[in-house]
Amino acid sequence: MKLYGIPNCDTVKKARAWLAAHGVECEFHDYKKQGVDAALLAKWMAKAGWDKVINRQGQTWRKLTEAEKAQVKDGASAIQLAQEKPSVIKRPAIEYKGKLILGFNETEYQNIFGEKS
């Protein structure tokens, strides 16, 4: 299992703490330092839709100009934005058994990962 995010993000911290407390091991990928591949973003967008992968509620999105926001209208433009500003990607993103899990929801994590401890 691989968890993608930014280490200082509060939501990523909550998700990592929950996973650790429940004995769920995962590899962490810091996409601010390690980047994020366009093919991976395309795969995520095919599964969830670009509008779910791009966090339009976050600070990074809100700081964009209206012109920059208007340019994001499909998967290709969303991928370009996500590669330029990886903080705009919904966090955390987890790849687990062929699924893509975006964000942190304790009930959802419990249903997916169950008690490992």
Image (spheres, rainbow, N blue to C red):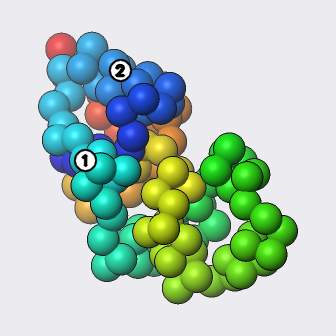
Residue drawn at 25 percent across, 55 percent down: 34
Would you say 50 lies left or right of 18 here?
right
Tell me if residue 14 comes above or below residue 94 in the rendering: above
Say which quarter of the image contains residue 42: bottom left
Point out residue 110 in the picture as x, y percentages from the top left corner. Answer: 39, 27
Residue drawn at 33 percent across, 27 percent down: 16
The foreground one among 91 and 81 is: 81
Say which quarter of the image contains residue 88: bottom right
Point out residue 64 in the picture as x, y percentages from the top left corner. Answer: 73, 60
Would you say 11 lies left or right of 109 here?
right
Tell me if residue 21 comes above or below residue 68 in the rendering: above
Would you say 116 lies left or right of 70 here?
left
User: Can residue 110 be seen in this snapshot?
Assistant: no
Say which quarter of the image contains residue 78: bottom right
> Which of marks 1 and 2 precedes in the sequence?
2
- Which marked residue is nearer to the observer: mark 2 or mark 1? 1
Judging by the rendered image, the residue that carries numbered circle 1 is 29
| Dot 1 amino acid type | His
Point out residue 90 in the picture as x, y percentages from the top left corner. Answer: 53, 51
Tell me if residue 29 comes above or below residue 114 in the rendering: below
Q: Secondary structure at mark 2?
A: helix
Judging by the rendered image, the residue that carries numbered circle 2 is 18
Point out residue 97 in the picture as x, y percentages from the top left corner. Answer: 23, 55
Residue drawn at 25 percent across, 47 percent down: 29
Q: Quadrant of the C terminus?
A: top left
| Dot 2 amino acid type | Trp
Tell me if residue 11 comes above or below residue 81 in the rendering: above
> Quick one: which residue is furthest to the right in this view?
66
